[in-house]
């Protein structure tokens, strides 16, 4: 059974991504990867309206990993929607969520044992940040740093790779599509802050040695389009964590979708975890009269 740390990493990577993808640029790699056996790609239709639904893995995935049908669907769509646009982030906003105010420090929040473990992981991960800087990090800032280290350690993100969501969004802009977002950067920061507590950091650090293989399993499940494996992971996630990162946001998105989508064809790309389960987007759309079919 996956530990809470793996559940948190899984949810962050498959459902929210602002912090993790904030300071990277597009990859220049030309290596080709075979197309997945089954993509996380669906079509929802109601009357003349078509929604193309794409489940993404926000980090560790390149355009070559995506189903080629995705790029055709972007060309056909009138509007393209993603979770949030990270291309114009507010530095002061980022700082307010990731850096502690004067008089507080992360070492005291974590305690001696976990601070030592955190420092060891950061050093081993090749991060050259000073101890002074690390002490200023909030639990959210520290947790985001740990996920970045995890991805690099597993060789999933080479220097210069942008989130697949942003690549889709930027490509839609080049094609002249209407582009919209479901959330602001600040809203996503708020969701992350709610789950990256001191206790969550303790759990991540305690279970760190088990993380690598589980992260690799998750990446492989996504690349292979293995929805059953991802659903099995979601079933292990505590209700409070899922409620914050998935269920609450799904309800908000369904409420706002009529004002964002095009009356003809809209492509919506969000974390794959948002489509699974009773509170997932597929079920919510079905309840609103959409007919859902998988695209292969």
Image (cartoon, grey):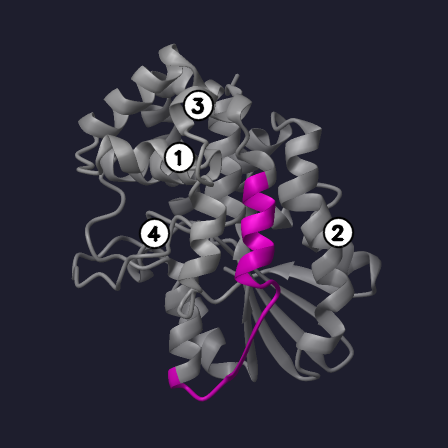
Query: Mark 1 or 4 closer to N-term?
Result: 4
Please give the label number shown on residue 61. 4
The reply to whether the C-beta atoms of the residues labelled 1 and 4 are less than 8 Å apart is no
The reply to whether the C-beta atoms of the residues labelled 2 and 3 are less than 8 Å apart is no
Distance from disc 1 to disc 2, alpha carbons, whole Å, reads 35 Å
Q: How crowded is mark 3: few (under 14 residues within 10 Å), some or many (20 or more)?
A: many
Distance from disc 1 to disc 4, alpha carbons, whole Å, reads 23 Å
Please give the label number shown on residue 142. 1
**Vertical arrangement, residue 14 with respect to residue 72, above or below:** above
Q: In this view, does 157 lie to the left or right of 178?
A: left
Distance from disc 4 to disc 3, alpha carbons, whole Å, reads 23 Å
Which of labels 2 and 3 is toward the front?
3
Query: Mark 3 or 1 closer to N-term?
Result: 1
| Residue wearing tag 2 | 283
Which of labels 1 and 4 is toward the front?
1
- Extreme bottom residue here? 176
Residue located 50% across and 59% down the image? 296
SS for callout 4: loop
Q: x%, y% of residue 266?
A: 60, 76
Give the image quarter of residue 68: bottom left
Distance from disc 4 to disc 2, alpha carbons, whole Å, reads 26 Å
SS for callout 1: helix
Question: For the magenta stretch, what is the residue range?
Answer: 174-193
């Amino acid at each position: 059974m996956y530990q809470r740390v793996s559940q948190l990493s899984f949810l962050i990577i498959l459902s929210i991504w602002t912090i993790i993808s904030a300071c990277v640029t597009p990859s220049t790699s030309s290596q080709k990867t075979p197309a997945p056996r089954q993509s996380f790609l669906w079509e929802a239709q109601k009357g003349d309206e078509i929604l193309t639904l794409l489940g993404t893995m926000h980090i560790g995935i390149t355009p070559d990993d995506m189903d080629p049908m995705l790029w055709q669907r972007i060309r056909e769509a009138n509007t393209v929607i993603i979770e949030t646009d990270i291309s114009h982030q507010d530095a002061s906003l980022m700082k307010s969520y990731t850096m502690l105010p004067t008089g507080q420090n992360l070492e005291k929040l974590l305690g001696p044992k976990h601070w030592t473990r955190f420092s060891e992981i950061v050093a081993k991960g090749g991060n050259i940040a000073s101890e002074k800087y690390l002490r200023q990090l909030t639990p959210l800032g520290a947790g985001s740093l740990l996920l970045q280290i995890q991805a690099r350690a597993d060789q999933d993100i080479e220097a210069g790779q942008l989130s697949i969501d942003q690549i889709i969004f930027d490509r839609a802009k080049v094609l002249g599509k209407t582009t919209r977002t479901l959330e602001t950067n600040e809203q996503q920061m708020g969701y992350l802050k709610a789950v990256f507590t001191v206790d969550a950091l303790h759990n991540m650090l305690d279970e760190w040695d088990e993380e690598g293989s589980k992260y690799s399993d998750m990446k492989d499940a996504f690349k292979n389009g293995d929805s059953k494996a991802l659903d099995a992971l979601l079933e292990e996630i505590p209700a409070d964590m899922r409620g914050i990162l998935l269920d609450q946001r799904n309800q908000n998105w369904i409420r706002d979708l009529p004002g964002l989508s095009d009356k003809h064809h809209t492509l919506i790309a969000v974390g794959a975890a948002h489509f699974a389960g009773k509170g997932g987007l597929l079920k919510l759309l079905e309840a609103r009269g959409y007919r859902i079919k998988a695209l292969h």
